[in-house]
Image: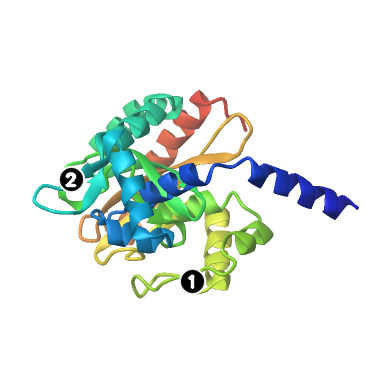
Amino acid sequence: MENALVKTESEQSNRYMVPGLIRGLKILQAFSSEKPFLGVSDIARELDVSRSTAFRLSLTLENMGFLKRVKHSKKYCLGLKVLDLGFKLLAGMDIVDIARPHMEELSENTKVCSHLAVRDGISVVYIARILGKHHTVSSVGVGTRFPAYATSTGRILLANLSIAELATLYEGIELKKITENTPLTIGDLINQIEQDKSDGYTLSWETYEKNLASLAVPIRDNTKEIIASLNVSCPTTTYSRSELLEQVLPELMQKAASISTALGYRH
């Protein structure tokens, strides 16, 4: 009886959804750093709709400023309205304003880039970045997404989940090999995260990118939940593993603690 009720509520919810709006939002989600430009045919394939439907949806989004026609091309890219929405979202996130001065001091003291990230499903989204002396190492801009399983920031954020929640989150999802040090199975990932929990930090050494090291720690709020990750990244030639842990980690943890305290976290 209870299952039937849940199914009925789900069916009622789906009945009120607007297919055209869903398709429009799926078009925006189809763009990525790997696919910054899409034509009508590309969009039709992504949504599994006819070319005429894809054309009408794309034209509507273009007229509203969410898509922009690429010059001398029949392809589209994301328009400024999408960026505007992103900045409005970030403007409302107090954590960025709270974290920024601590991140600036962190990068000044360590001479490397610092980033603030949050989790969105199986991805991490970078919401703030401060360049350090070795700024050429970071091409990560605000809004950049990375796979959570392959990054230090992602593993810290995944540490907020139970083993059962992790298994459910990655059910049916392939962990692609990015470097020799990337976890390839959910079992490997869980083992790494359990070690991260024990350590209180995540050290990534060429896990996502060759010659790149990253160190991340959690940021908690007044509920004691991990809501963000603070990390530093640099070439593997800037600091050795031991130097990162001995010289940079204490500074990183102190800044994360200050941000967490400002967000209401208490031991």
Q: Residue visible at 44% across and 36% down?
A: 256
How far apart marks 1 and 2 lie (CA) works out to 32 Å
Residue 152, given in percent of the width and then of the height, sits at: 41, 55
Asked if the residue under mark 2 is in contact with the one under mark 1, i.e. CB atoms within 8 Å, the reply is: no
Residue 148, given in percent of the width and then of the height, sits at: 45, 56
Please, is residue 93 above or below residue 174 in the view?
above
Q: Which residue is mark 1?
A: 174
- The amino acid type, in three-letter code, at marker 2 is His
List the single residue furthest toward the right: 1
Please, is residue 131 above or below residue 105 in the view?
below
Q: Residue visible at 36% across and 31% down?
A: 85
How many residues crowd mark 2 within 10 Å: few (<14), some (14–19), many (20+)?
some
List the single residue furthest toward the front: 52
Please tell me the numbered disc located at residue 135. Answer: 2
Q: Residue 215 versus residue 4: which sits nearer the camera?
A: 4
Residue 257, given in percent of the width and then of the height, sits at: 48, 34
Please tell me the numbered disc located at residue 202. Answer: none
